[in-house]
Image (cartoon, rainbow, N blue to C red):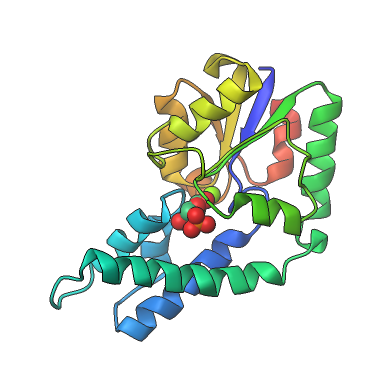
Amino acid sequence: MKAIIFDLDGVICFTDEYHYLAWKQLADRLGIEFDRTINNRLRGVSRMASLEIILEKWHGEPFSQEQKEAFAAEKNDIYRESLKNMSPADLAPETKAALIELRNRGYKLAIGSSSKNTPFILGQIGLSGFFDAVSDGNNITRSKPDPEVFLKAAEFLGMEPAECLVVEDAVSGAEAGHAGGFKVACVGDAAQAGVGDWNMGSFTELLDICK
Ligand code: BG6
Ligand code: MG
């Protein structure tokens, strides 16, 4: 392996919790049942596809496309308010140290995230310009479990999928990695589901996988 492609939300930083809280606020306002188990299905999934999953529990008249777009914008506004409070202190010291060590070992490092907020988040946590390539929700048309975001990241790095390791916390993300021909190391929910080639207890275990 010559390169590592990291998911962002739930891998590099804990913005996955802010996604959950923002969707929860919207769901509560609409009177829709929503909990952390349903939330796990939103990991890695685009904003509009996430809304569709939440609306599976809506039993009233179907919403128009315009209403759905307004709901997604409402959630994103709540989410962006949380992001505004983030700073480089929200990047765990051990995560930052591991990223620097992996770079020193010669690996190219990239982001592969479904989020359109990726550039803003990287700026907030002090990682703007750190990665050799960033592939995110702004350069894809299909979100995970489609492999497009990781294939683009590999292309931006000038690498083949077989040369790259994908790091994910989402089951949909691990599926995307495998569908693209990548090996996948998982943390969090995806590690608990056991869907990775490696299922890690913490991010720093990458240092044992990528010698
Ligand atoms: C992924 C998150 O990284 O980005 C999903 O895991 C989220 O929960 C998706 O829906 C899209 O994010 P955004 O910031 O474009 O709404
Ligand atoms: Mg994630």
The x, y position of residue 150, in whole percent, is 52, 31
Residue furthest to the left: 61
Q: Residue at x 42, y 34 (%)?
A: 176
User: Looking at the image, which is closer to me, 167 or 201?
Assistant: 167
Relative to residue 198, is residue 208 drawn left or right?
right
Q: Residue at x 51, y 23 (%)?
A: 182
Relative to residue 39, is residue 96 drawn left or right?
right
Relative to residue 105, is residue 55 drawn left or right?
left
Give residue 80's quadrant in the image. bottom right
User: Looking at the image, which is closer to me, 75 or 104?
Assistant: 75
The x, y position of residue 102, in whole percent, is 79, 30
Residue 197 visible in image: no
The x, y position of residue 40, in whole percent, is 42, 57
Q: Residue at x 65, y 22 (%)?
A: 157
Give residue 36's quadrant in the image. bottom left
Q: Quadrant of the N terminus?
A: top right
Residue furthest to the front: 66
User: Looking at the image, which is closer to me, 109 or 72?
Assistant: 72
The x, y position of residue 49, in whole percent, is 33, 54
Relative to residue 9, is residue 151 drawn left or right?
left
Q: Quadrant of the C terminus?
A: top right
Residue 39 visible in image: yes
The vertical placement of 91 against 156, above or below, is: below
| Total numbered circles | 0
The vertical placement of 194 against 155, above or below, is: below
Q: Residue at x 36, y 77 (%)?
A: 27
The vertical placement of 141 against 125, above or below, is: above
